[in-house]
Image (spheres, helix red, strand yellow):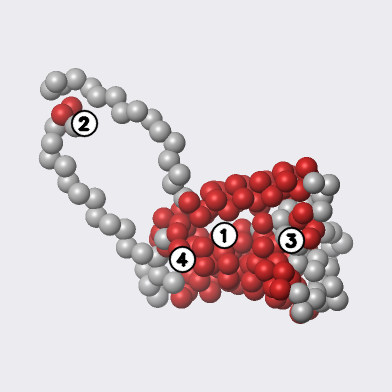
Amino acid sequence: MPGKATLTAMRIRYNAPVTLSFALLAAGILVADQLTGHTLILRYFTVPGRNGFNWSEPLGYARLVTHVLGHAGWPHLLGNFSIILLVGPILEEKYGSMSLFIMIITTALVTGIINVLFLSTGLLGASGVAFMMILLAPFTNTKAGDIPLTFILIVILYLTKQIIGSFQHNSIAEFAHLAGGFCGSLFGFLHTPRTPRKATVNNEYPGDAD
């Protein structure tokens, strides 16, 4: 009826499939690990250091990527995915789900290989992916050839924080943050966000919509 307001049913939409699936899978793995005596993540979702990597074991190569799904506990997971769930959907909309998936896999592989080749401690967690997204985010609203000022400021603050953190004795892998940030910067310079599709004009009266 003309003039009568129509009520649209609210529904939950799986708006960012790669980001959401990443978060849900990591959470599910942590739950399963806690139910199985904390052996699942150590065996399948942690990449060892250079002295512990078995080059003849096929599973070891998979762990170069799967380590981003493993987390030491809920504070570790929530710290990473509070960033990923905030920035990831924006990047997924701008670059596409497949492109973001490739970026996540590439970042995981880079950090995993660096850990195996140069470091002696094990590595797990999605912090490298989170920092990749942080450094990639400023490129989402810039034209090709431009360097966002926000990107420069983030790099300055980010590098300062990581350099200071590298001199402190903690369990945080600053190198993974740096490697992830480098990957995000590289993706930003090399990968142009896709052009949004133009919205179609609907000339129908809103009250007549189904």
Query: On residue 134, which mark appears?
Result: 1
Q: Earlier in the sequence, mark 4 or mark 2?
A: 4
Decide which of 36, 150 is in the foreground and name it.
Answer: 36
Mark 2 closeness class: few <14, some 14–19, many ≥20 residues within 10 Å: few
> Quick one: SS at disc 3?
helix
Q: Looking at numbered disc 3 in the image, what kind of residue is underneath it? A: Tyr
Decide which of 158, 78 is in the foreground and name it.
Answer: 78
> Quick one: SS at disc 2?
loop
Q: Mark 2 = which residue?
A: 210
Mark 4 closeness class: few <14, some 14–19, many ≥20 residues within 10 Å: some
Q: Earlier in the sequence, mark 1 or mark 2?
A: 1
Q: Image quadrant for the N terminus?
A: top left
Q: Looking at numbered disc 1 in the image, what kind of residue is underneath it? A: Ile
Give the residue drawn at x 73%, y 46%. 32
Are dots 1 and 2 in contact, CB under 8 Å?
no
Query: On residue 44, which mark appears?
Result: 3
Give the residue drawn at x 78%, y 42%. 35
Residue 131, above or below 8: below
Q: Nearer the viewer, mark 1 or mark 4?
A: 4
Query: On residue 77, which mark appears?
Result: none
Q: Mark 4 = which residue?
A: 99
Residue 27, above or below 18: above
Q: CA distance from mark 4 to mark 3?
A: 25 Å
